[in-house]
């Protein structure tokens, strides 16, 4: 009977030791669980942030394309103004001295007309310079807007790639979380069984 009692005590001691080991393991896994939960929350916050950056880049690209269309229209308008002005300028400047003389009422009128033509030529030349610079500027603006739209598309592509990676990562974290949850559940069941077993053994010792 003494031996039997000793054996039961030994079993009870072993059961208690197993329970203690399980509790340690469970604590470690619970630590891992909270780290995983934190990682999951951080990954999801990062996902939200990048998704809003992607949206902003696409909005900015759309705005840049609208501005590009406006800049293109302005460029066409400037090209027309430039062409019209050049045409008028040639018409005036190509009048021969004889034509001007024949169209003048008097010699004084002739000199006045020559002066007017010369003034028109000068002002036209200034106007053409101004138009040329407006034309260059319109072209530059159109190029800048188009480049900006392309840059925004590149940023959007990069953000999309980051989101795809994060999605995989979140999936992996959630899979690990689910595995760890299952581990903890099965440990808790094992712990319950061992505690029942230990209680039975202790009741035996007492009886």
Image (cartoon, rainbow, N blue to C red):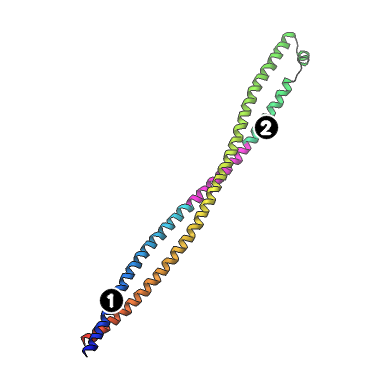
Read off the residue under disc 2: 80
Query: Is 69 contained in the magenta span?
Result: yes
Q: Nearer the viewer, residue 161 or 50?
A: 161
Nearer the observer, disc 2 or disc 1?
1
Q: Secondary structure at mark 1?
A: helix
Q: Is residue 100 above or below residue 203?
A: above
Q: Quadrant of the C terminus?
A: bottom left
Give residue 78's position: percent from left, percent from top.
64, 32
Q: Residues within 10 Å of mark 1 (few under 14, many from 20)?
A: few
Q: CA distance from mark 2 to mark 1?
A: 94 Å
Q: Secondary structure at mark 2?
A: helix
Q: State the extent of the magenta-drawn residues as a range.
A: 52-73
Give residue 35's position: percent from left, percent from top.
37, 61
- How many discs mark residues in the rendered view? 2
Q: Is residue 49 above or below residue 6?
A: above
Snapshot quadrant of residue 16: bottom left
Q: Is residue 9 above or below residue 180?
A: below
Q: Quadrant of the N terminus?
A: bottom left
Q: Residues within 10 Å of mark 2 (few under 14, many from 20)?
A: few
Residue 17 shows which numbered tag?
1
- Magenta stretch: helix, strand or loop mostly: helix
Q: Which residue is at the far bottom?
A: 1
Give residue 138's position: percent from left, percent from top.
60, 34
Residue 204 shows which numbered tag?
none
Snapshot quadrant of residue 10: bottom left
């Amino acid at each position: 009977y003494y031996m039997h009692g000793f054996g039961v005590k030994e079993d009870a001691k072993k059961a208690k030791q197993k329970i203690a080991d399980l509790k340690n393991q469970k604590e470690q896994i619970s630590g891992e669980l909270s780290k995983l939960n934190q990682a999951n929350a951080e990954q999801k916050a990062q996902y939200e942030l990048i998704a809003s950056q992607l949206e902003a880049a696409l909005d900015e690209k759309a705005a840049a394309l609208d501005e590009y269309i406006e800049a293109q229209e302005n460029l066409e308008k400037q090209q027309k103004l430039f062409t019209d002005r050049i045409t008028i300028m040639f018409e005036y400047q190509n009048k021969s001295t004889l034509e001007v003389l024949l169209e003048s009422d008097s010699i004084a009128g002739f000199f006045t007309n020559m002066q007017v033509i010369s003034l028109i030529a000068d002002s036209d030349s200034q106007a053409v310079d101004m138009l040329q610079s407006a034309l260059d500027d319109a072209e530059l603006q159109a190029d800048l807007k188009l480049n900006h739209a392309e840059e925004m598309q590149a940023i959007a592509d990069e953000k999309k790639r980051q989101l795809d990676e994060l999605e995989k990562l979140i999936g992996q974290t959630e899979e690990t979380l689910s595995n760890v949850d299952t581990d903890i559940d099965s440990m808790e069941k094992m712990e319950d069984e061992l505690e029942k077993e230990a209680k039975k053994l202790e009741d035996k010792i007492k009886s």
